[in-house]
Image (tube, helix red, strand yellow):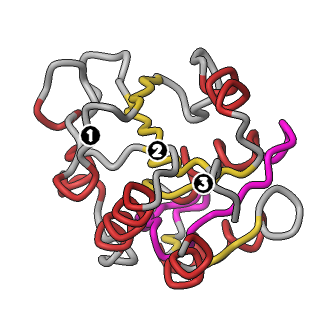
Amino acid sequence: MNDKAVLLVIDVQKAFDDPRWGRRNNPEAENNIALLLKAWRETGRPVIHVQHIGVTPQSLFRAGSAAVEPKPEALPMPYEAVIRKSVNSAFIGTDLEARLRVLGCTEVVVAGLTTNHCVETTARMSGNLGFRTILAADAAATFDRTGPDGRVHAAEDIHAMTLANLHGEFAEIADTRTLLEAVQ
């Protein structure tokens, strides 16, 4: 992995601790994100944080609420960029692509919440824009979801299917340990 590989930390916000989300997979995601952040910082690689800001009054991500703030494991350093978005992709309505191009970035490592929403959408766009995109599988998580037929789908299954859908076409899939070894 080159020294310009950007770690993109997506929506690791307190709003995801709200019980209304339901049952979640991968309780270690935030710890793995913290490990990736530590390695990126120690090796001087760029980090960009993405923060979701809801546009409706009932949003858990309402601007100005405590829930919109980053979780402790993913607090940005003063010198790290924070991009705010209001849709699933961190590339829509933001200057993310321009920032990556200015940095000379060709590789993007994606981690965050939730696997099948903003993480997936951003990873797909990153791949489509020509960046080598790597999703840190154990540094992402999602929640159980109810399908249109009323059937509940387990977070583990949704997470695994999202990784399968992305792998080999939009992104590479790796675990935190492999990524940490690659940046040392």
Residue pictured at 69% horizontal, 73% vertical = 173
Residue pictured at 73% horizontal, 55% vertical = 133
Check contact, mark 1 vs mark 3: CB within 8 A.
no
- Which class describes the residues within 10 Å of circle 2: few (<14), some (14-19), or many (20+)? many
Q: Residue 135's mark?
A: none
Check contact, mark 2 vs mark 1: CB within 8 A.
yes
Q: Is residue 90 above or below residue 55?
A: below
- Say which quarter of the image contains residue 149: bottom right
Residue pictured at 59% horizontal, 15% vertical = 93
Q: List x then y, in percent, for residue 21.
A: 30, 55
Magenta-tinted stretch: 127-150
Q: CA distance from mark 1 to mark 3?
A: 41 Å
In front of the other: 38 or 62: 38
In front of the other: 113 or 50: 50
Q: Is residue 110 above or below residue 24?
A: above
Q: Which residue is mark 3?
A: 148
Q: Which residue is mark 2?
A: 47
Question: Label 3 is placed on what type of residue?
Answer: Pro
Q: Earlier in the sequence, mark 1 or mark 3?
A: 1
Is residue 52 found left or right of 22 in the rendered image? right
Residue pictured at 53% horizontal, 51% vertical = 7
- Which class describes the residues within 10 Å of circle 3: few (<14), some (14-19), or many (20+)? few
Is residue 128 part of the magenta span, yes or no? yes
Element type where label 2 sits in the image? strand
Q: Earlier in the sequence, mark 3 or mark 2?
A: 2
- Say which quarter of the image contains residue 90: top right
Q: Which residue is mark 1?
A: 77
Which one is in front in this view, the residue at disc 1 or the one at disc 3? 1
Q: CA distance from mark 3 to mark 2?
A: 37 Å
Q: List x then y, in percent, for residue 95.
A: 60, 18
